[in-house]
Image: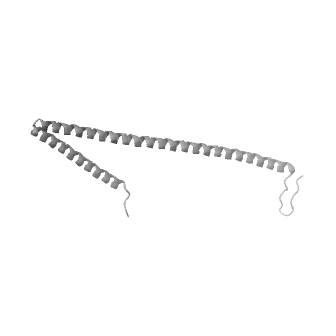
């Protein structure tokens, strides 16, 4: 029969209850250790995934920069080639005493350059307006 603690009026636990309690505590600690191991494994996998994602992003950004530089270089080569070709045609026209042809070529090139500069300026204005529209209002 269980003893009664006279001071509080609570039965003292017997040996079976204590051993069952200790066994439950041991099982709970084992379960907690497994949970911690799984959490650590999850964190390690997340860390590895993050590293690989950052490496992939770095590679992608480097390739994007290289592609942009290559494109810009190709545009400059094209513009330079067309400029040399236009200059050669103007020189050839002047050499053959066809000043009117040379003047028309120069007018056309000047109009193309003016259109390009104007278009570039309009694009800059539109981009600045778009960034101002997206910016948060100032207090």
The furthest residue to the front: 95
The furthest residue to the right: 1
Numbered-mark total: 0
Residue 45: image quadrant is top right
Horizontally, is 52 left or right of 95 in the view? right
Residue found 32% across the figure and 52% down from its top: 130
Q: Nearer the viewer, residue 58 or 95?
A: 95
Q: Quadrant of the C terminus?
A: bottom left
Q: Is residue 130 above or below residue 58?
A: below
Horizontally, is 72 left or right of 95 in the view? right
Q: Nearer the viewer, residue 58 or 11?
A: 58
Residue found 33% across the figure and 55% down from its top: 132
Q: Position of residue 43 (x, y in %)?
A: 61, 46
Q: Nearer the viewer, residue 10 or 77?
A: 77
Horizontally, is 97 left or right of 12 in the view? left
Q: Position of residue 6 (x, y in %)?
A: 87, 62
Residue found 28% across the figure and 52% down from its top: 125
Q: Position of residue 44 (x, y in %)?
A: 61, 44
Residue found 64% across the figure and 43% down from its top: 41
């Amino acid at each position: 029969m269980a003893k009664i603690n006279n001071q509080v009026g609570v039965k003292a636990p017997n040996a079976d209850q204590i051993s069952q309690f200790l066994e439950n505590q041991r099982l709970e600690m084992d379960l907690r250790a497994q949970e911690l191991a799984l959490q650590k494994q999850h964190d390690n996998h997340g860390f590895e995934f993050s590293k690989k994602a950052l490496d992939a992003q770095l590679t992608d950004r480097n390739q994007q920069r290289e592609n942009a530089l290559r494109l810009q270089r190709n545009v400059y080569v094209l513009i330079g080639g067309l400029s040399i070709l236009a200059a050669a045609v103007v020189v050839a026209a002047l050499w053959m005493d066809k000043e009117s042809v040379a003047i028309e070529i120069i007018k056309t090139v000047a109009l193309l350059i003016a259109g390009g500069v104007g278009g570039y300026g309009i694009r800059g204005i539109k981009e600045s307006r778009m960034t101002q529209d997206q910016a948060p209002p100032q207090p």
